[in-house]
Structure formats: C-alpha cells, structure tokens
Amino acid sequence: MQNLFLKILEEARYNSTKNKLKRNINAAIMTIHIKNPQEIEKMRVAGKLASEVLDFITPFVKPGITTEEIDKLCHDYMVNVQNTIPAPLNYAPDGHTPYPKSICTSINHQICHGVPGPKALKEGDIVNIDITVIKDGFHGDTSRMFHLGETSIQAKRLCKLTYEAMWLGIKQVKPGAKLGDIGFVIQDFAEKNGFSVVREFCGHGIGKQFHEEPQVLHYGKPGTGLTLEAGMIFTIEPMINAGKRDIKQMPDGWTIVTKDRSLSAQWEHTILVTEIGYEVLTVSDKTPSPPAFIN
C-alpha cells in the first residue's frame, strides 16, 4: 500500500511539473507579438532605412578609413538625413555598460558587437557593419560583410557561404514551419562546408523593442521549436567561423571574437512571416541580390 501511495504521489508531482512546464511554454509563446498591418508597414519603412544606411556607407569602406570614422558617417546620416535614431547608441540590456557608438563594426576574427575605434582598416580585411535604426518607434536591423581590397580565398569563401546560409534559413520561413527548420539548414550547410556556427548569439524578434521574442537559433533540429505564424517579424543573422565555434568576450564588454582567432562572418536581414511565405524587410536599392537558388 505504501509503495502504491508513493507511486501515486510521484505521478502527481510529475503531472504537476509537466503542467507547469506547459504553462510556462505557453506564457513564453504569448509574449511573441504578432504585428498588425499598420505595424508591418512601419517595420517596412524602418527596415528600408536601415538598409539605406549600408548603401550610403559602402563607397567609404576602403583601406585607410577607421571604424570610428565609419561610425560618425553613419551616425550623421541617420540623424541628419533620415531623421532616425541609432538604436545601439547607449543601449544597455541587463545592466551592460551602455554601448558607446551608433553602429557595430566587427573586423576579421571579431564575430559581433565590435565597437568602432581609431584603428584604420587595411587591405585584405573583412568587416561586418551592423545597422539598427529607430523610425517612428519601430526598429530596422540589418548587416552586411565588406571586403577591403583583395581578400584571401578563405575570406571570400566564408563571406559567400555565410550569405548563402542566411538565405537558406530565410527560405524556410512560412506559416506552419518551425524555428528549428531555420537553424537546421544553416548549421547543416555551414558544417558540411567545413565551418562552424556560433551558438551563443542568435536572431531575435524585433518591432517596438530592439530585441523581442522569439530567439532564432542558427542551429537545431528540423520540426522542433516554435511554430511560425503570419505577422511574426524576426531577424536571421548567422555568425559563422572559419575555425572552431568557441568565442571570447573582449575587455570592452561588447566585442566578441573567435577564441582561435579564425575569421568570422555574419549577414543579417529582418524577415516578416507572410500568409504564404516571407518578406525581407531590409531591402534597398543597393542590397545584394539573393543567391541564384532563391529565384
């Protein structure tokens, strides 16, 4: 009798824990904001403006310029020409030291969140420029890779395949798909090509807040995770390393680098889930074309 009682008690505890877990999952899902048509239109505007900052800065990204100079050019363009707000400036999540600049510039083995500084870019460098603007209370977030003069074969291949990995992820987006579908194709493609995927940083929901739910992992298993619904907006922004996936944070509290100092690349678009598939919101006149397999 005692054993039966203990068994019943254990089952009750298990069911209670399981139900609590379900409630927690449902609560987390409830925090995902499905955008209405008016919000989607504002996100289109913000996304295009973010992309136009990258169009503007492209001719200036040459050997000899410093990332601090790139930051000032972008800042002035955002504030004085676009009448937008640079979202990264003084951004301080979870007690972080406020981010001191208006954009992120990650060079060579820097993975993400590189803080612009006085060091000049040189021939052969690769650099990611990450732009987030705020327009009428809504965020647009995008990034591109840039080559400084003639870069190495490895650098060219890494940047190209990272771009293709991002688009493979985008191609999975449609109502009813799972977040794990996105992560799986990115990871599978990167690893089959001899590269590794950074795990500690991911894409994210975006809208009135810089970072919203859901988190969009760039690795995972197909058929797992949150089910996508029309009206969701999030970024897909894989960070892919030429060497191992391990990372290290620099003393500035922001810049993340590869632990083995191998090259790293990242591309980013903001994506809307539509009724029939997806729409890329961070597109402008000079946005690079999608890979051939998308058409």
Image: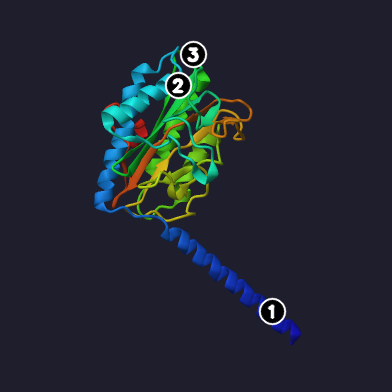
In the displayed structure, does residue 277 sit left or right of residue 5? Answer: left
Q: Are marks 2 and 3 in contact (CB under 8 Å)?
A: no
Q: What numbered label is drawn on residue 7?
A: 1
Q: Is residue 185 left or right of residue 274?
A: right
SS at mark 2 in the image: helix
Q: Nearer the viewer, mark 3 or mark 1?
A: 3
Label 1, secondary structure: give it: helix
Of residues 196 and 143, the one nearer the viewer is 143
Q: Identify the amino acid type marked 3.
A: Lys
| x then y, percent, for residue 262 | 59, 25
Question: From this viewpoint, is residue 231 visible?
Answer: yes
Could you tell me which residue is drawn at 32 percent across and 44 percent down? 138
Local crowd size for mark 2, using a 10 Å CA cut-off: few (<14), some (14–19), many (≥20): some
Q: Amino acid at mark 2?
A: Glu
Return the mark for residue 122.
3
Q: Tell me which numbered mark, 1 or 2, is placed earlier along the sequence.
A: 1
Of labels 2 and 3, the one closer to you? 2
Give the quarter of the figure containing the C terminus: top left
Question: Which residue in the rendered view is the most extreme toward the bottom?
Answer: 1
Query: How far, Cα to Cα, is label 3 from label 1?
Result: 69 Å
In the displayed structure, 50 sits above or below 223; it is above
- Measured as percent of width and height from the top left, residue 122 is found at 49, 13
Residue plotted at (52% across, 21% down): 154
Residue 157 is situated, as x and y percent measured from the top left of the image, at 48, 24
What amino acid is labelled 1 in the image?
Answer: Lys
Residue at 51% in and 63% down: 24
The residue positioned farthest toward the right in the image shown: 2
